[in-house]
Amino acid sequence: DYAMGGCKEPRKLLAVLERLRARVEEAREKADASDSIGSDLVGDADPSLLAYNSAVVLYQLKQYGKARAVLDDMFAQIEPVDEFLAFRSCFLLLDLQLLQRQLEKAAEVLAYLERSYAMLTKSDGGRENGSAESRDSADGASSLPSDWPNKRSARRPPTDISPEEVRSALNLYKAKLALLARSSKSSKREIKTTLNACAQDTTGLFLKANNESLRQNYRKAMKLLSNCNQRSERDPNFAALYYNNMGCIHHSMRRHTAAAFYFGRALRENASLCAPAANGEAVPLTHFSCDRRSELEYNRGLQLLLAGKGEAAFACFHAALKLLHRQ
């Protein structure tokens, strides 16, 4: 019902998920007290799935602290969680930890994923899943090995996740972590590995431009951004991200007026994504989660302040408070 309604009532969905979680936990407590009583109520209900769905909704609502608290509890008891669900939960937790600059905790989650991935990609014969021999087996029509992952998952994903996709995601997150830690050499190595695996990866090109900017190679950074200025299926607000990155590069070059111009362009692109709100319609949660107005207003306000335009900067900071006061 939530999806068919256009994902426009996330808080109602969140309330339903919370009630379901409470009922499942209560039923499990009764089942623990007696092997017979309450066992029928639990059935196949999985509280970890309900927790993950709640965390996804909270993340899209930009309530990052609450979402991270839910996933932190899951990660503390990750072993019994379904395999694919554990992978998805860990990657979402990584996003939250990187957003909130919790680098040590992010490194811990990333290390767990790497250990789990290394175990999952080893077949019984000692070969890695996804190798040429595995890909050529069966009818040769699919590159996904039948034993990926080895430990059986009770829940198959909507689309198959190949070992190569997991490896690429791990490299990207390692690069993000290295960039936030200001480890230029390490991030350059991880980004190079990612781009070699997928030369047209837009996220990898963005990270490479970020790394070049940190190394003060600003012209090279802008050239890299220009090469990846295209629409992205994963993020409908790609154009705003492009102009935001251009603004950040000009800020590093101390060209604050030019940076403010690029942040203004990013705000206009961002506004086009949320156009339905101007007509009084609810914005789908998938679009709201990509809305970066508050961050862009803050960035533009900072440039205006540095350019000596205090009144205009104050207006931008006031607009940014709608979200950033809680982060």
Image (cartoon, grey):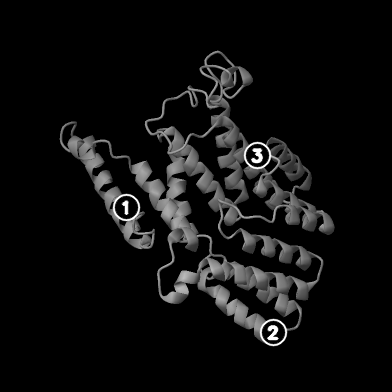
Task: Specify whether 32 is left or right of 321.
Answer: left
Residue at 51 percent across and 47 percent down: it is: 92
Q: Examine the rendered structure and indicate whether residue 45 appears above or below residue 293.
A: above
Q: Amino acid at mark 2?
A: Gly
Q: Amino acid at mark 3?
A: Asn
Could you tell whether 153 is left or right of 311 in the image? left
**Is disc 1 placed on a helix, strand or loop?**
helix
Snapshot quadrant of residue 219: bottom right
Looking at the rendered image, the quarter that the N terminus falls into is bottom left
Front residue of 45 and 131: 131
Total marks in image = 3
Q: Amino acid at mark 1?
A: Leu
Image coords of residue 284 (percent x, y): 43, 62
Question: Does residue 181 appear in this view?
Answer: no
Q: From this viewpoint, which residue is outermost toward the bottom?
A: 311
Query: Which badge, 3 or 2, comes first in the chain's sequence?
Result: 3
Residue 79 drawn at (x, y percent): 44, 33
Write down the residue under mark 1: 17
Give the percent coordinates (x, y) of residue 164.
Answer: 60, 32
Q: Label for residue 171?
A: 3
